[in-house]
Image (tube, rainbow, N blue to C red):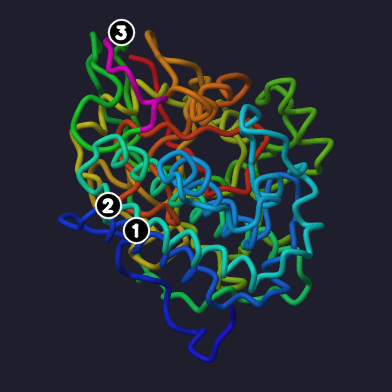
Amino acid sequence: MQNPSGNRPAPAASAHASGQSLAERYAATRALTEDLCRTLTPEDMAIQSMADASPAKWHLAHTSWFFENFLLNPQDPAYKAFQPDFGYLFNSYYQSVGPMHPRPARGLLSRPALAEILRYRRHVDEHMRRLLERQAADPTLGLLVSLGINHEQQHQELLLTDIKHLFSLNPLQPVWRELPRPPTTAPVPLKYLPQPGGLMLIGHGGDGFAFDNETPRHQTLVPAHALATRPVTNGEYLEFIRAGGYRRPELWLADGWTMMQREGWDRPLYWNADMSGEFSLSGMRDLDLHAPVAHVSWYEADAYARWAGARLPSEAEWESLTAREEVAGNLLDRGFLQPVASAAPGLTQLFGDVWEWTGSPYQAYPGFKPLAGSLGEYNGKFMANQFVLRGGSCVTPASHIRASYRNFFYPQQRWQFSGLRLARDG
């Protein structure tokens, strides 16, 4: 998809703004996904760098399959699939829909070619446009389209993190796109804000879209605690490394110590060997000591917190504080696509920059009910052996995030923009 205008900055506008119709939101989201691929070659888009990642062209096709399978097929009796075999190739994990190509082997799909996948997107978009024209007032359709839009926004973030991982493995250290550099800021001392305990309302309870795993809204007892005013920075994490953090087993959970030794971790993913720089979507950059540390696993975040005499916050502690804050920050729309330092005093960087690991295992809220049918596989079946992250990252679309949003990953995964904010008891 490379073209001569490939060095334009990353999109600064949101994929959809308030006041847009559902059809406009759909079109804007689909356009942004393709824009994120604008500077990639067909060769870039075919490669899979590891089992956790997917080729860019698979993301383009899977997000189209989602609309085809969950909206066009059931809602439009006259709809004919673009290519029946695509259901097998681009189903991700919906076992109740049918069999699927193995996830670790997505990079072996040299066919269909990128051009055919782009024709597939045009086919789905045209039929979705007609469906929205016919049934614009149908509330059930509106909910399904909103789910599809939010699903595609998740894949926009995955697409960027997967490209970053892929390019980081290339000795040429290719640049995805030239990105603006944030202004240099002075360090802001880390402080802890005491928070009273009590019964708190947690979970999505307002208007607007939410995933099923954010519901139902419920009361939970939150003990008195204190939360750090900002995330842990690169400079602070560097102190942990220099203090022997990766050589002290007393700081690590047993599984984390085993994983760290087996994988040879001794610094965050994408830091260079002398820890003076880090790989970014715009190539190698000097390490900004005041920016939030990113690309650390839950095991690393937990070990750092123990070294710092603190702990990771629970997701209830995190949400009970952030629910009162405006959703704003260094998100995809700002165009940096890299965590940046903040000079703001007080509580800051709750949204954007890095997904913040919590100490909470990903499990169902009391009274949780998954969506009906195959869509019930979207979130509920993953509620085991993972941990919750909160707040969004520098590659999360601004219109996608909210205080109740629950992201989740396995404790060893670190190719996402994952960082941490500290908490203390009492």
Do tag 1 and tag 2 residues touch (Cβ < 8 Å)?
yes
Dot 2 lies on which element? Answer: helix
Residue that carries the numbered disc 1 in the rendered image:
130
Q: Residue at horizontal 28%, vertical 57%?
A: 23
Q: Residues within 10 Å of mark 1 (few under 14, many from 20)?
A: few
Q: Residues within 10 Å of mark 3 (few under 14, many from 20)?
A: few
Instruction: Report the Cα–Cα distance between label 2 and label 3.
Output: 47 Å
Where does residue 264 sit, x and y in percent of width and height? 81, 43
Q: Which mark is residue 309?
A: none
Dot 3 amino acid type: Leu
> Mark 3 or 1, which is nearer the eye?
1
> Mark 2 or 3, which is nearer the eye?
2
Locate the N terminus by quadrant: bottom right
Dot 1 amino acid type: Arg
| 219 in the magenta segment | yes
Question: What count of labels does the image hold?
Answer: 3
Residue that carries the numbered disc 3 in the rendered image:
221
Q: Residues within 10 Å of mark 2 (few under 14, many from 20)?
A: few
Q: Residue at horizontal 74%, vertical 60%?
A: 273
Query: Which badge, 3 or 1, comes first in the chain's sequence?
Result: 1
**Residue 235 in sight from this viewpoint:** no
Where does residue 426 sit, x and y in percent of width and height? 33, 14
Dot 1 lies on which element? Answer: helix
Residue that carries the numbered disc 2 in the rendered image:
134
- Which stretch did the figure color magenta? 211-220
Q: Residue at horizontal 42%, vertical 64%?
A: 126
Dot 3 lies on which element? Answer: strand
The one nearer the camera, 195 or 67, is 67
Looking at this view, name the residue that lies furthest to the left: 19
Where does residue 322 sit, x and y in percent of width and height? 26, 33
Instruction: Report the Cα–Cα distance between label 3 and label 1.
Output: 48 Å
